[in-house]
Image (cartoon, grey):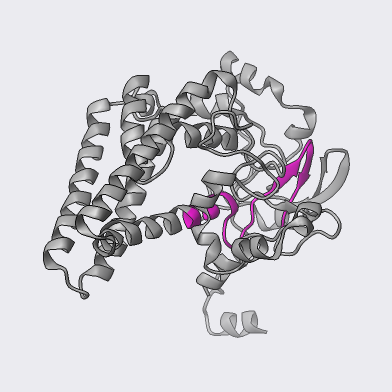
Amino acid sequence: MATWVLSECGLKPLPPTFPRPKTGIVNSNSNPSKDPKFQSRRSFTSSSFRDRNFGLRVSAPLRVSPIEEEEVKKDVKINGGGVENEVGEFDPGAPPPFNLADIRAAIPKHCWVKDPWKSMSYVARDVIVVLGLAAGAAYLNSWLVWPLYWAAQGTMFWALFVLGHDCGHGSFSNNHKLNSVVGHLLHSSILVPYHGWRISHRTHHQNHGHVENDESWHPLSEKIFRSLDTMTRTLRFTVPFPLLAYPVYLFSRSPGKTGSHFHPDSDLFVPSERNDVITSTACWSAMVAILVGLGFLMGPIPLLKLYGVPYLIFVMWLDLVTYLHHHGHEDKLPWYRGKVDILIRKISMPGDIISLSVETCIQFIFM
């Protein structure tokens, strides 16, 4: 009817419009690379991988699929089970069609260059800021300034931790001794045992997303959860206690795990790492001794205001950022046990995995 009215008035109708399809990258029809190295890297993928669509949810897709393709359903087999997914739908539980070697090969070579002078400039900058903030707060000594100082200095303690984190990963420089010295100075200053944490953090990366073997905020099995006493449950799942869990984790790890980041005979470490752990524990103990001496020198209250409260802010930053990095907020990341992919959602899976964690705490904070 509208078309007839427009034609009678001598106007041409507008071209038809279609609703915007879902975002997602769809496979291009272009030919794959002829590079034999590229082909060899892809040789590990099975035929089932080639049948899958691993499009990612991005805000600016390379190409959107035609509306007709959105209606097509595609059968994807995962671990022998059949699952139907829409074309362009990202399945977080499906194995990716690439490995770490492919990712490394895709990163430009200049990104792998480590500049120790630039890295040390970051250390010098952050240390100067930390000392400047402490000196300014002590000089002004006003309750109008202290809350601002705590927030700023706690964030700077977190910055020191990140630099030590890069030393532990070896991305700070190619010099192992420089990484170790700088890492010990930075981490010991904020009461983190450098080698003890570095080794457990390596274990975390090697087992990321594994229900039993991961180190960071992994979900608890129903058996372990039911074995926890009331105090442990309260401290782990009640705001704000989970955001202060990091010092407890360093001493006794997570529920269901044994060992300590300070003890060289812990099951976190192998015998060849014993001396490294002893060195880090000694550096941590020296920092504790310095803080105790400062407490006698300036008094416990000034020390609490200058160091204690910023340390607690740093711990909250560390726990919050670590949790969000490895779990997400609204979109949850998958967990797996053995060779079976297990996707932990907001609700627990009866009789299998209890997904109770600080998830509820994080949601409460961001409400």
Q: 180 above or below 64?
A: above
In x, y percent, where is residue 341? 76, 43
Which contiguous range is marked in magenta? 319-344
Q: Is residue 184 magenta?
A: no
- Residue at image point 16% right, 62% down: 138
Query: Is 339 drawn above or below residue 86 in the view shown?
Result: above
Residue at 59% x, 53% y is 327
Q: Please tell me whether residue 61 is drawn above or below residue 28 in the rendered image.
A: below
Along the line of sight, the residue nearer the viewer: 8 or 67: 67
* Number of numbered discs visible in the structure rendering: 0
Q: Is residue 333 magenta?
A: yes
Left or right of 33, for residue 258:
right
- Please give the name of the residue rendered at 49% of the width and 50% of the height, measured from the top-left corner: 247
Q: Position of residue 217 (x, y in %)?
A: 61, 51
Residue lying at the far front in this picture: please name it.
296
Judge left or right: residue 133 versus residue 62: left
With 212 as the anchor, is 117 left or right in this view? left
